[in-house]
Image (cartoon, rainbow, N blue to C red):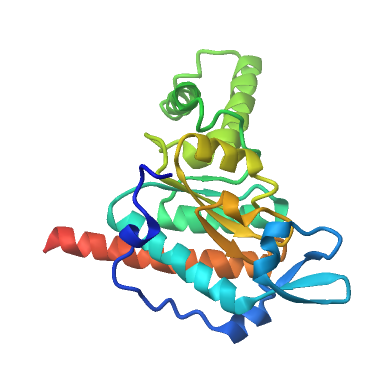
Amino acid sequence: MAEQKTKAEQKTKKDSFNIELEEMARVGLYLGHKTSNVHPKMKPYIFGKKNDLYLIDLEKTKEKLEEALQFIKQLISENKVLLLVGTKIQARNILKGVAEDLGLPYINERWLGGTLTNFETLKKRINYFKDLQEKKEKGELVKYTKKERAKIDKEISDLERKFGGIKKLEKMPDAIFVLDMKKDATAIKEARKKKIWVIGVADTNVDPTLADYPIPANDDAMSSIKYILDKVREIVAKSETKNKDSKQS
């Protein structure tokens, strides 16, 4: 992304994010995949193995997590849009809770092909969904038969599952945060094609170079996922509060 700002240019004064190696170890960030399932480009982030699992170097995880958080802080301070993506079952509810608390757009069900590369078409579907919701809330569906209303309700439910997390997304996101770079590889591919920044949790089975800000860590354990998302929650909440304070002053 030569035409975009470099990472060094994105950074301001380096912050302390209260990241402790002991806590990272306790929640299992260091546990990688089986030794038979490793991506060669993840080897610089691996310090050893235990039984049949590779172990991730938490010193490097801390360094990369801090870089990612610093970048997220910069994004939020500039009122840019961060899209959270986590479609694996154990991540869905955690990601949804964090995103809704922060008012961030999110995708926690299946990534729909073309979400970024065909964004204008996506917006039309979202507008259709919002229109149906509005008509239901205003009682404009009472003119339909019971059977027809049931069909519309099912359609609204299906659209909510697909688009509920991004119905307020008015423009392309400036960056995406991906919890599983392998499962949501399509999201990363589309983001790179559209020159959108990628922050990604990189377990030992993925290519970390596909993310602008890779975070080498366990992407399976709920404790690991929650730890990383809690750090994202903290920095976004602080940045948004600072933005509001600066506007009021």
1 or 149: nearer the eye? 1
Where, by quadrant of the figure, is residue 170 drawn?
Answer: top left
Out of 207 and 184, give the one closest to the viewer: 207
Q: Is residue 38 above or below residue 132?
A: below
Q: Quadrant of residue 93?
A: bottom right
**Quarter placement of the N terminus:** top left
From the viewer's side, name the closer residue of 48 and 175.
48
- For the point 33% across and 48% down, which residue is it? 80
State left or right for residue 209 relative to residue 13: right
Q: Residue furthest bottom?
A: 22
Note whether 154 is above or below 176 in the view shown.
above
Whether residue 233 is visible here, answered yes or no, is: no
Question: Could you tell me residue 126's position as x and y percent?
Answer: 48, 27
The quarter in which the C terminus is drawn is bottom left
Residue 216: x and y, percent? 62, 65
Q: Position of residue 82 (x, y in %)?
A: 43, 49
Residue drawn at x 47%, y 35% as measured from the top left: 194
Q: Is residue 206 above or below residue 134?
A: below
178 vs 16, left or right, is right
